[in-house]
Every structure is written in structure tokens, then in C-alpha cells.
Amino acid sequence: MEWRGRRQSDNIEDRRGDPTGGGFGRGGGFNFPSGGGVRRAGGGLSIGTIIFLVVIYFIFKAMGIDLMQVLDTGGTTSGPGYEQSQSGGTRTPANDEMTAFMRTVLAETEDTWQGIFQAQGQNYEEPRLVLFSGSTASACGSASSATGPFYCPSDHKVYLDTEFFQELSDRFGASGDFAEAYVVAHEVGHHVQNLLGILPKFNQARQRMSEAEANKMSVRVELQADCFAGIWGKYTQQKGLLESGDLEEALNAAQQIGDDTLQKQSQGYVVPESFNHGTSEQRVRWFKRGFDSGQLSACDTFSGPI
């Protein structure tokens, strides 16, 4: 994907390395499935480790080196993904390649949907993209790496732990910048659904549904987000930004994160009534339908079979 040198969005919140992030678990969001998450080690120090550190401390003390002074940074250090400002210690987003790429992809979705909404006489309210590492807080509850990327309709924000892309590549064999862009475009698709009133209606109806019925309706919601992502892909292609193999990257990502494929990988068999995102075949087909047509009218997943 030819993304360098393009406009970059300002609607980014880079919380990577933020020590005030929330706990694990979330509620009420619409996520990009990962079939499980990246598990992080935790827990405290053992007694043996503490004794070892104490011994090391006194050894350095005898050498005239005060480790406590060395470790005392005066609050001037910053976590990964941030640059420390010169005034007030305010954190600002890091200017790394991942941030630049995310800003550019988000800007392209803004241009696409702003144009589509304006053609219908409406204004497109741009979402914000929150980049985090480990966990962070959202209006839908705490977000963590284990949940995968998701959209929270309560605060109109997409939450993304960028390490998910490494998992997408290593675990699912879905690498490439356009595969990563598809993930963002899918979550922005949920934002479009929210603005169109689709998500509020679904959330209201879900309260009266059984789990099986809610899963079936959720599949339709997710496939429409895939179709909306395909529309974005179409507009990106029309701008001449797609390189050879980009479309295949997105289709492969859609293939690898289908409910049936994920269940086969994790447990060796599938339970169709538990599907809530769609099969690999469905996800590929609906993304391609949006990509081929570039029209909202082609993304009606709520009428007829899917």
C-alpha cells in the first residue's frame, strides 16, 4: 500500500506505555476476533530474587555506586510509544512508523466516508483511534490485548493494541500493511454503522434475544462491517494506492479470522451456533462485495441469506 507522504489524521490517541491503563476485560464493544489473545506474564518477585537484589545493592554500595540514585529518574522517563515534552511532562504520540501508518490509514477512511456521507447530504463524524499496549480504559469497559481490536459505540473510539498485528502475522499467517489496514477499516465500519443507527438498533434488539439469536444477528453486523471495509478498499484502489498483492493480503486476513477457521485451529471442530463474526467464506465474500461495488446499497446483510 502506497501510504507514505499521504495526509495523516489527528484523531489518534497514543496510550502505548501509559502506566494508568485499566484492567483486563471489556463490555459493549464490537471486536475483531483473534481466537484468544496474547498472554502476558505477571506476578511478584520471589524471595530468592529479592535476596539477590539486596546483595547486588550492597555490592554496588561498597563500590561507591548508589543504585537508588541511579534509578531515581525524577519522573523524566517515558514509556515506549511516547516522547516526553519539554513542558509539564505531557505525553505526546511517538513519531514512529506504526503511528504514521495508523494516522495515514485513519485519514484515508475519513476521506472515504466523509465523501460518501456528503453525497447523501450528511456529515461524517470522525472517530478516534486509540493505540495502547497491554490494557487501557474505554467507555465500554477496560480494553486489553486479549480482546483484539474493537470499536466502542459509547465514546466513538476504535481501540487497538498494535502488537495484535504481530499476532495476526505470526499466528494466523496474515501479514502485510493492507491486511493491517483492513483491521482498522473494519472497526471504522462499525463506527459507520453506529452513525447510521444500525448498532443502536442491534443493541436494543439484542436485549430481547436468546444467545443463539443474538449470535446470528451479530454475524450480520460483523459481515456488514467487512463490506464497509471493502468499500474503503475500493476508494483506496481508485486513488492508485494499492500495490500488487494488497487485495490478496486483505482477503487472506478475512479468511484467517473466520469463526470456523478460528475454532478449527483452537479446538479442532466448529460449533456453528456459536459463530458471531461469520465464516471465512462469508467474510471474504462480503469484503469483496464492498470492494467490487463501492456502494452502501451492496452491503445490506440484514435482508435475505448471508
Image (tube, grey):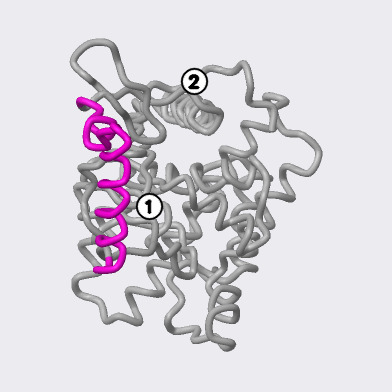
Picture quarter containing residue 127? top left
Residue 64 is a magenta residue: yes
Which image quadrant: the C terminus?
Answer: bottom right
Q: Residues within 10 Å of mark 2 (few under 14, many from 20)?
A: some
Q: Residue at x 32, y 36 (%)?
A: 63
Q: Are marks 1 and 2 in contact (CB under 8 Å)?
A: no
Q: Which residues are magenta?
A: 46-74
Q: Position of residue 123 (x, y in %)?
A: 34, 25
Residue 99 visible at all: yes
Q: Position of residue 92 (x, y in %)?
A: 33, 22
Which residue type carries mark 1?
Answer: Phe
Residue 146 versus residue 16 in the image, above or below: below
Toward the viewer: 98 or 300? 98
Q: Residue at x 57, y 77 (%)?
A: 260
- Magenta stretch: dominant secondary structure: helix
Q: Position of residue 274 (x, y in %)?
A: 42, 81
Q: Residue at x 67, y 24 (%)?
A: 239
Give the residue at mark 1.
150
Q: Secondary structure at mark 2?
A: loop
Which residue type carries mark 2?
Answer: Gln
The circle on residue 8 is: 2
